[in-house]
C-alpha cells in the first residue's frame, strides 16, 4: 500500500517535472533551462511526445537503482538534487547580475552599485507620491504591506515541519 501511494506521489511529481506548467506559459517565458529540458527538439514548442519522453526521463532519473520503482529515499534524493540545482542556478543568476562587466569577479564598485540599485528600487516603491522623500506614513504603509505578505502562524505552530 505504501509503495503504491509512493508510486502515485512520484507519478504526480514526474508529471509536474514534465513541463505541464511550462506548456501553458506564454511565449515570453518559453526560454531558459526549464523550457529547454522539455522542448527536446528546440523548436520552441512542446509536443505530447516530448512531454512523455521528459516524464519517462524524470522517473528514470529518480529510480537511481534502476529497479523500476522509486523508494522514499530515492524520491527524497531526487527532490534534494532538484532543490540544490535550483539554488545553484539562482546563485549564478544573482552573481551575474552583480558582475556588471562579466569578468567573473564582483568588484567592490559592482557590489555597491548593485546594492544601491536595489535600495533605490525599494525607495521608489515606498515613495508612493514620488516626491523624493519617504514620510512616516509611507514607511508605515510599506511596513504593513510587508507584514501582510508574510505567512500567518497559527498559535503553537512550530517552524519545524
Image: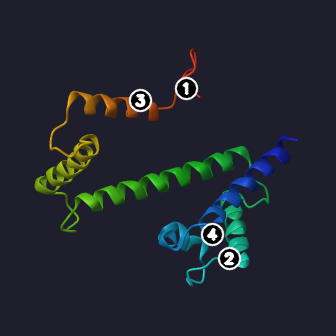
| 103 relative to 151, above or below | below
Q: Front-most of 85 and 119?
A: 119
Closer to the eye: label 1 or 4: 4
Q: Which mark is residue 160?
A: 1
- On-image quarter of the N terminus: top right
- Which numbered disc, 3 or 2, marks the residue that appears first in the sequence? 2
Q: Front-most of 106 and 21?
A: 21
Counting from the top left corner in percent of width and height, residue 57 is at 68, 68
Q: Secondary structure at mark 4?
A: helix
Badge 2: residue crowd in 10 Å (few <14, some 14–19, many ≥20):
some
Closer to the eye: label 3 or 2: 3
Badge 3: residue crowd in 10 Å (few <14, some 14–19, many ≥20):
few
Counting from the top left corner in percent of width and height, residue 93 is at 35, 60
Residue 99 sits in which quadrant? bottom left
Is residue 70 found left or right of 105 in the rendered image? right
Q: Which residue is mark 3?
A: 147
- Which numbered disc, 4 or 2, marks the residue that appears first in the sequence? 4
Q: Which residue is mark 2?
A: 50
Q: How many marks?
A: 4
Give how far apart the Cα atoms at labels 1 and 3 are.
Answer: 21 Å
Closer to the eye: label 4 or 2: 4
Give how far apart the Cα atoms at labels 4 and 2 are.
Answer: 11 Å
Is residue 70 found left or right of 145 in the rendered image? right
Give how far apart the Cα atoms at labels 4 and 3 are.
Answer: 34 Å
Does residue 64 appear anywhere in the picture? Answer: no
Give how far apart the Cα atoms at labels 1 and 2 are.
Answer: 39 Å
At horizontal 70% and vertical 64% (from top left) the residue drawn is: 60
Give how far apart the Cα atoms at labels 3 and 2 are.
Answer: 43 Å
Counting from the top left corner in percent of width and height, residue 34 is at 53, 66
Does residue 57 appear anywhere in the picture? Answer: yes
Q: Which residue is mark 4?
A: 23
- Which numbered disc, 1 or 4, marks the residue that appears first in the sequence? 4
Amino acid at each position: 500500500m505504501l509503495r503504491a501511494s509512493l508510486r502515485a506521489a512520484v507519478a504526480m511529481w514526474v508529471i509536474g517535472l514534465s513541463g505541464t506548467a511550462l506548456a501553458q506559459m506564454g511565449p515570453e517565458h518559453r526560454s531558459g533551462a526549464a523550457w529547454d529540458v522539455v522542448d527536446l527538439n528546440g523548436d520552441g514548442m512542446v509536443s505530447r511526445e516530448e512531454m512523455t519522453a521528459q516524464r519517462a526521463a524524470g522517473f528514470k532519473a529518480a529510480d537511481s537503482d534502476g529497479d523500476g520503482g522509486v523508494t522514499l529515499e530515492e524520491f527524497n534524493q531526487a527532490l534534494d538534487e532538484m532543490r540544490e540545482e535550483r539554488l545553484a542556478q539562482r546563485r549564478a543568476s544573482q552573481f551575474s547580475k552583480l558582475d556588471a562587466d562579466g569578468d567573473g569577479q564582483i568588484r567592490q564598485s559592482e557590489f555597491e552599485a548593485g546594492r544601491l540599485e536595489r535600495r533605490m528600487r525599494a525607495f521608489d516603491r515606498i515613495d508612493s507620491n514620488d516626491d523624493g522623500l519617504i514620510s512616516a506614513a509611507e514607511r508605515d504603509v510599506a511596513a504593513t504591506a510587508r507584514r501582510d505578505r508574510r505567512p500567518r502562524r497559527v498559535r503553537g505552530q512550530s517552524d519545524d515541519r
